[in-house]
Amino acid sequence: MENDTNQSGKPFKITDASRDVKKGVVANSLDDLTSKINEKLGITGEITIVLESDGTEIDDEEYFATLDPNIALMILKNEEKWVPQAPTCRLNLDQVDDARGGAELAGLVGKIKHNLCHVSLLGGAELEMLSDMDPESLVDITFPDKIFLEQLKEASGRFLCEKRQAQDAMDLLRLYQEKEAESGETN
């Protein structure tokens, strides 16, 4: 039975770097897979084949032979790089006040969950949205981690407070400079 599988090849799930194109390919070898991918996807030039799950490059026949059937592979062209799949964000929009910004909040939380550095780049409106969020209602999203949501809310509130204090200090300094300029003109 195993010999039959080797004769007909192994099935693979193929996707491109954007994960928009998805095809099924059956191949006996890495060279066979490469030529079938080029043919099915209409690719000319060099390609790199990696595991879709973690970006491990498949560059020799020995490693190719160890791959499980139906494994997902990604095709990278030119200078494309593998990136992990962004988490999907779903939000239950049962509550009336969620209708305005629920999807936006879910996307924002998903972006931050994927890369925490985004918090420091957020504007006042986004920080306010995060600091006003109800972690209980967001646990329904793909983020079952309530502790993360509570800490994100707290950190967003701190960042928002610091931004407002800095803005108030700048406004006060500007007023002081205007008064100094006015008193300098009258003397």
Image: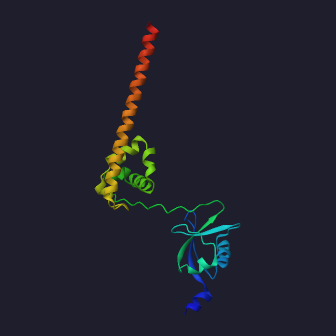
Q: Is residue 124 visible?
A: yes
Viewer-proximal residue, 1 or 104?
1
The structure residue drawn at horizontal position 58% and vertical position 91%, both measured from the top left corner, is: 4
The percent position of residue 58, horizontal first and vertical second, equals 60, 72
Quarter of the figure that contains the C terminus: top left
The percent position of residue 138, horizontal first and vertical second, equals 33, 57
The percent position of residue 19, horizontal first and vertical second, equals 54, 65
Viewer-proximal residue, 60 or 107?
60
Q: Is residue 25 visible?
A: no
- Rendered image quadrant of residue 94: bottom left
The structure residue drawn at horizontal position 63% and vertical position 72%, both measured from the top left corner, is: 59
Q: Is residue 174 above or below residue 44?
A: above
Quarter of the figure that contains the N terminus: bottom right
Viewer-proximal residue, 71 or 16?
71
The structure residue drawn at horizontal position 37% and vertical position 50%, both measured from the top left corner, is: 100
The percent position of residue 158, horizontal first and vertical second, equals 34, 42
Determine whether, in the image, residue 111 is placed left or right of residue 43: left
Q: Is residue 57 above or below residue 118?
A: below
The structure residue drawn at horizontal position 31% and vertical position 58%, both measured from the top left corner, is: 146
Outermost residue on the left side: it is 136
